[in-house]
Amino acid sequence: MPQALAGYRICDFTGQLAGAGATKWLAAFGAEVIRIEDPVRQGRWDILRGAPPFKPGQRGIDHGGAFNNHNTEKLGITLNLKTDKAKAILRRLVAISDVVAENFAAGVLERWGFGYDALKTIRPDIIYVSNCGFGRAGPYSRFKTWGPIVQAVSGLTYTSALPAQPPAGWGYSYMDHTGGYYMAMAILAALYHRERTGEGQWVDLACTDAALTLNGPALLDWTVNGRGQRDMPINSNRSQFGAMAPHGIYGCAGDDAWIAIACRTQTQWEMLAQLIDAPWTTAFRTLAQRLANEDALDGHLSTWTSAWDKYALEAVLRERGIPASAVQKPAERVDGDPAIRDFGLWPTVRHTAMGEVRVDGLPVHFSRTDWRIERGGPCLSEHTDHVLTRLLGLPADEVAALHEEGVL
């Protein structure tokens, strides 16, 4: 059965996660995504190409684990766009593509001669999607950026501090994930608009603006109360915008073992107190008492949970209707949880250089046109000959000559 996006072709200049994560979704649902890279710079367009994690004994630009993860089901070609012949090939590719997608710094494609105005002359209904740190307009548009800068400008860094501590940052690049998701949605919306009207367009997306959308509670608190997120007591595991206690992460028996417990109602607390069956629980009978003395409550509860195996306690609490879950480590969440495993969230793909490897799947399934991820990300220039001969119709000897000339 055809996949949901079969028949669409994406001319893809995206990299890292904020862009490549978007086109990964499209490729998984059947779009033909042709990833274009530079043969001269050997992976420098996308630093993840040769970056860890690696499989044991494997290194190099065709072995980057994160690159493979973000580029499954894509075709990979190389074009040296400093040459006129490569630009001519790109024009032919754009002419038969539905979308040109990139997440370079603002103005890169324009400098190469492939800005939106130029793309429209090649294909009038082309959809051009650009995704950079600050977008293509406004006072910051000329600035380049990276994860920590996006976090800082968007306000995420400020909200990351614990009480009396400096901002910690958000660690892994959540704004790149968010930017990628928004980029995928934007491409689909633009395709839908073109299906209805025949019109292509330029979709301008800013990763910093995407990150701003993760600030909802803090922005609302300022708008309504004139209060900044750091003006109130912060514990990242406690409920700040809903009166609940206990609501946190508590240590269990064993090395680095934890459990999450969240009592949303008085009945749930009473069930927990009955299970604990200790005199200290009487000091926390009401929600008001628990909220006023949350540090003491968490201290007592941590002492009690420390004697339990996290999974055993999880089962006991769930049987009583108390929201709880063991905090899972990577190996546990990938292989230990049958609900996650059976959903197919980590499929195994076949990569030309690395062999069989696991990658992230998509957290959604369609009953009739589901996604499929079976092929690993492309090695550098892996599909150049295939695309140029079969898709563009160039003779094999001409393609060989282009390799010799440094065009490909």
Image: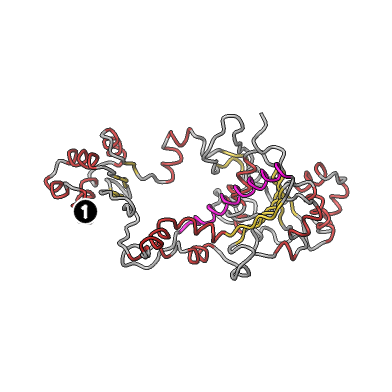
Seen from the viewer's position, the closer of residues 59 and 217 is 217
| Horizontal arrangement in the rendering, residue 360 relative to residue 84 (left or right) | left
Which quarter of the figure has residue 274?
A: top left
Seen from the viewer's position, the closer of residues 247 and 137 is 137
Prevalent SS, magenta region = helix
Q: Which residue sits at x=27%, y=37%? A: 317
**Residues rendered magenta in the picture:** 171-197
Tell me, yes or no, if residue 72 can be seen here: yes
Residue 28 shown in magenta: no
Residue 33 in picture, x, y percent from top left: 69, 45
| Horizontal arrangement in the rendering, residue 331 relative to residue 135 (left or right) | left
Residue denoted by label 1: 299
Q: Which residue sits at x=48%, y=66%? A: 152
Give the residue type that dot 1 points to: Gly
> Quick one: quadrant of the N terminus?
top right
| Horizontal arrangement in the rendering, residue 189 relative to residue 56 (left or right) | right
Outermost residue, left direction? 279
Which quarter of the figure has residue 372?
A: top right
Q: Which residue sits at x=22%, y=40%? A: 272
Q: Few, some or many C-alpha atoms within 10 Å of disc 1 (few <14, some 14-19, many ≥20)?
A: few
